Each structure stands twice: as structure tokens, then as C-alpha cells.
């Protein structure tokens, strides 16, 4: 099917991306959603604290209605960081309930979890910048 020459618009020489393919702006915001968890950890000084999921939460709330890819990745980052906050709370509870003896287990487990958190957040940020929807492993899907 051919298009008559008078119906062709020359105002926009670049065609819009196909439906389902995130734009450059969406990729950038999705990248920010993942990296904001690292920024939150630096600012608050806690990997398992509120700072880690505050950034993804704000980005998800602001962009969820206008950018579907950012909504998906922001929600994914939020769920992952909430899951790790629960793990951190469980480790802290272990320390309290054992009157400090739980440190023997909590310190190495916390270090491994913290290193895994950093690796997975960086991988997710790289994938988001490429426009690939990343799914964190072992994540509770609390925010639907």
C-alpha cells in the first residue's frame, strides 16, 4: 500500500520507536531508578536501610503513569531493595535475639548479601540503559 505524497510529513525525519521499545529518555530514567539505590546507601550509610528504596520509590511514583519501561524497572528496583531491607532486619533481629552471638553469622552473611546487592544493582543499571527489562533474582514482588 502506497501513501500519497501529500500525506507524508517531513517535520519528523526520525520515526518513533516501535511500541514496546523504550525511548532514550525511558532508558535513562530506568538507569536512575536502579542507581538511586546506591546513592541512597551512600547518603544514609546503610545498605539495608530506607535510603536504598527511597530513590526507586520516588522515581516509580513520578514516572509510572507516563513511562511504562521506567514503571517496570522502578518497581523491580523497589521490590529488590525492600527484600534486602527485610533481610537486613532479619540479620539485625538475629543479633538482638542471640545477645550478640548472632554476629558470628550475621557479619559474613551480611557482607555476601551486600556484595551481591551491589553486583545486581550494577547489572540491572547496565541492562536498563540498554533497554532490557531486568529481573532481580530472589526478590519478593511486594509492590504490584
Image (tube, rainbow, N blue to C red):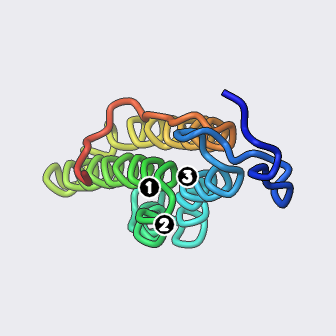
Q: Report the side of 23 relative to 73 (left or right).
A: right
Q: Residues within 10 Å of mark 3 (few under 14, many from 20)?
A: many
Compared with 49, 140 (above or below) is: above
Q: Residues within 10 Å of mark 2 (few under 14, many from 20)?
A: some
Residue pictured at 52% horizontal, 39% vertical:
20
Q: Indicate the position of residue 24 as horizontal and vertical percent values.
A: 71, 51
Q: Report the side of 110 relative to 33 (left or right).
A: left
Q: Report the side of 75 relative to 31 (left or right).
A: left
Q: Residues within 10 Å of mark 1 (few under 14, many from 20)?
A: many
Q: Secondary structure at mark 1?
A: helix
Q: Indicate the position of residue 40 as horizontal and vertical percent values.
A: 54, 66
Compared with 34, 39 (above or below) is: below
Residue pictured at 50% horizontal, 35% vertical:
134
The residue identified by callout 3 is: 34
Mark closest to the chain's N terminus, 3 or 2 = 3
Disc on res. 63: 2
Q: Secondary structure at mark 2?
A: helix
- Foreground: disc 3 or disc 2: 2
Residue closest to the eye, 126 or 19: 19
For the residues bearing labels 2 and 1, Cβ distance under 8 angstroms: yes
Residue closest to the eye, 126 or 29: 29
Residue pictured at 85% horizontal, 50% vertical:
13
For the residues bearing labels 3 and 2, Cβ distance under 8 angstroms: no
Disc on res. 58: none
Residue closest to the eye, 117 or 124: 124
The residue identified by callout 1 is: 71
Compared with 140, 143 (above or below) is: below
- Marks 2 and 1, how far apart in space? 6 Å
- Foreground: disc 1 or disc 3: 1
Mark closest to the chain's N terminus, 1 or 3 = 3
- Marks 3 and 2, how far apart in space? 14 Å
Q: Indicate the position of residue 106 as horizontal and vertical percent values.
A: 33, 42
Amino acid at each position: 500500500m502506497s501513501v500519497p505524497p501529500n500525506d507524508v510529513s517531513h517535520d519528523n525525519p526520525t520515526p518513533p520507536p516501535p511500541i514496546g521499545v523504550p525511548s532514550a529518555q525511558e532508558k535513562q530514567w530506568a538507569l536512575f531508578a536502579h542507581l538511586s539505590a546506591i546513592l541512597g546507601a551512600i547518603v544514609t550509610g546503610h545498605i539495608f536501610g530506607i535510603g536504598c528504596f527511597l530513590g526507586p520509590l520516588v522515581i516509580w511514583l513520578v514516572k509510572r503513569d507516563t513511562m511504562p519501561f521506567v514503571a517496570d524497572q522502578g518497581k523491580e528496583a523497589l521490590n529488590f531493595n525492600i527484600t534486602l531491607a527485610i533481610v537486613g532486619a532479619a540479620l539485625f533481629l538475629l543479633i538482638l535475639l542471640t545477645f550478640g552471638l548472632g554476629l558470628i553469622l550475621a557479619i559474613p552473611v551480611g557482607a555476601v548479601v551486600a556484595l551481591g546487592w551491589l553486583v545486581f544493582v550494577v547489572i540491572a543499571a547496565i541492562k536498563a540503559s540498554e533497554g532490557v527489562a531486568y529481573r532481580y533474582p530472589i526478590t519478593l514482588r511486594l509492590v504490584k
